[in-house]
Structures are given as C-alpha cells and as structure tokens.
Amino acid sequence: MKDLLELLEELSTCPGPPGGEEPVASLIRRHLKPRYQFQRDGLGSLIALKEGSRKEPRLMLTAHMDEVGFMLQSVTEGGYLRIQPLGGWIASQLPGQRLHIHGSKGPVEGIVAAIPPHFRKEQKSELKVEDLLVDVGGASRKEVASLGLQLGDLITPVSHFAVYNKKLLANKAWDDRVGCAVMVAAMKKLKKHPNMIVGAATVQEEVGSRGAVTAVEVAKPQAAIVLEGPPADDLPGVAKDSPQGALGKGCQIRLYDPSTIIHRRFWEWVTELAQTKKIAHQLAVRQSGATDARAIHMAQGGIPTVVLGVPVRHAHSHSGLIHIEDVKATLALTIAVLEKLDNKTLKSLLPT
Ligand SMILES: [Zn+2]
C-alpha cells in the first residue's frame, strides 16, 4: 500500500507534457529495470517486454505518459508569454493558476493572467486559451530570454500531491499517470503468466494517440489492455442517469466511446473475471472522449482491445482526484487478466 501510494505520488508529480515525456519514461524504466527488456519507438514510447511460461500471446498493457500541457507560443514586447494548449483545457479554469515553463535553465514559474474584461473587445465572448498570458516577472523579451526561455518550451501545471479524507488522492496529471502506475505495479507484482507481456508507455495521447499509432508497430500485440484515467461523472448534473464513472465504485470497464466499439467478447470475458474474483467494477458507455484504443484496435488487421479505467474527478485541470480503492480494483483486475489470458482463451474470444 505504501509502495503504491509512493508510486502514484512520484508518477503524478513528474512533468511530462505531449512531446516531453522523457522524465516519465526514465521513471518507469527505473521501476521495471531488473526484470524487463526495453525497446523505444522513434517518437519516444517505451516498450518493456517479459516472457512468461509461453511466448504467445503477446499482450500489450498500455498507458499514456503525457499529461495535458502547453507550449510557449510567443513573447509579447512587454515580456508576457502566450501559450499553445497541448490537449484539452478549459480556459476559464486557468487564470490565477501557476505553470512551470521548462526552459534551458530549469523550470521557471509563472502565473496565468487573463486580459481583464474591461480591456477585452468582445466582452461577452467565451474566454479562450489564446486570450491568456503568462506572467513570469519579465519586463521585456530580453529579460524572458535571460531566464532561459524560448519559443517551443514545454509547460506543465504547478500542483502538489495530497490525500483527502484518507482515501482520495489529489494532484495534476492523473490522466494518465494513474494508468502508468497501475501498469508499473501490475508488471512488478506479476509472477506466473502464460503469455508475453509487452508493456507500452505511450507518448502524445492527448494530441490524438500519436504514440499509440507507432508503439503498436513495435509491440506487435495479439491483444491489448489500455489503462486510462477517464473523467468521473459523479458530480451533480454531469450524468444523465446513474454515474458510470463514480469514485469509489471500482474499475471502469469501457464498452464504447465514439472512437472505439470495444471488442464485445473480450470485455464480457473481463467482466466475468471481475465478477468471479469479486473485484469492484462499473460499466461505461461513453458518449464522448477517446483513448489509445482507437489506434491500437485498428492496427495490424485488428487487435482485440479492452479499456480499464480509474475515474478522475476534475480531469484536465491543475487538481484532479482519484479514489485509492479504484486504483486497487483496477490493479487486481489487470493482474487477473494477465495471469489468465493464454492462447486458448484468446482464441475462444476471436471470430472463427
Ligand atoms: Zn488519458
């Protein structure tokens, strides 16, 4: 338990925006080092392999390393930064928040400033990220450059890890560092397995699953399990009917989103396994969103893929919340799948 909490804190605190995932990759490699062999793809995804009692099937266990972030787009005459979002942000949540701009002299902290309504031409228009400025205390382009900052620098939220009410964990980047934590913990804990484990920590999911497109070519899986931190819908007014991603209700098994119809026999088999092992789970038919499954399930002639998730409240912001029991349930179900999915079982799930 202490190990799992430490792993969650370490992974969620680590900076890793799209295109800048290397600190996360190093961390994951360090945790898996003695028992796994590593490969990289050309975009930066990390692939870790271990053979069990059989070489097949090759099971891809995957989570994306990137978190939503920004890139330094330009610097105003007076030394303010403009930022390009990398992934989906709600602009109205940003003013007053702090960011780290990862420059050549290390991270520089700045505060997000909105142009006050008095000075905005269209006062009633919705706030856009493009309207926001970041104040790093520089009074000119020259002063900003002297801080080691330049166009293209990557930017992440400033946040910190905290435990609320003994069971909820707060920090940035739960989407998808909680998936990375479950992947790492499962790969460390796993002992006997009748298959080849191919762990893939992917890059650039938040800008359109670009890392998954390339990682799957290296991983060459016969089935895949995508581990995610999907948005929770247990806030008042979010779910139309009962929530399908409530904190504390267990591992979310995704059946559908607009990018992927999850392989029916595979998710049914996983759900039965959860029932047999008495692992808390909740089924979700998502009417929006996508995961790396969108790229993986259509690769190499079609790969049966399931998506397991730990619901994240306030996702894509500076401060998300997850429930430790959901992490444990997702970890238990992931290990159960890896221990059980052999060639014969996989064959029975495939069309004949
Ligand atoms: Zn995600």
Image (cartoon, rainbow, N blue to C red):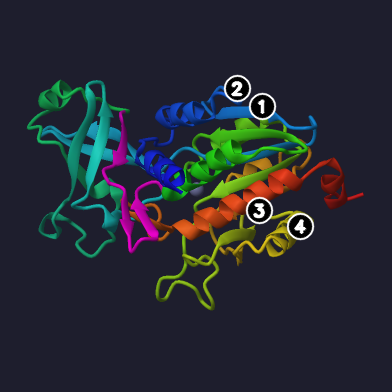
> Quick one: label 4 or label 2, which is nearer the N terminus?
2
The region drawn magenta spans 153-173
Answer whether residue 310 is visible to the viewer in this image.
no
Label 4 sits on residue = 269
The picture quadrant where one finds residue 55 is: top right
The kind of residue on which mark 1 rests is Val
Label 1 sits on residue = 218
- Label 2 and label 3: CA atoms lie apart by 27 Å
Label 2 near ligand 1 (CB < 8 Å): no
Label 3 sits on residue = 260
Label 2 sits on residue = 39
- Label 4 and label 2: CA atoms lie apart by 30 Å
Q: Position of residue 186 (x, y in %)?
A: 59, 42
Residue placed farthest to the left in the image? 139
Total of numbered circles in the picture?
4
The kind of residue on which mark 3 rests is Thr
Label 4–label 3 contact, CB within 8 A: no
Mark 4 crowd level (few <14, some 14–19, many ≥20, 10 Å Cα): some
Q: Is residue 277 left or right of residue 134?
A: right
Nearest the viewer among 109 and 118 is 109
> Quick one: label 1 or label 2, which is nearer the N terminus?
2
- Label 1 and label 4: CA atoms lie apart by 27 Å
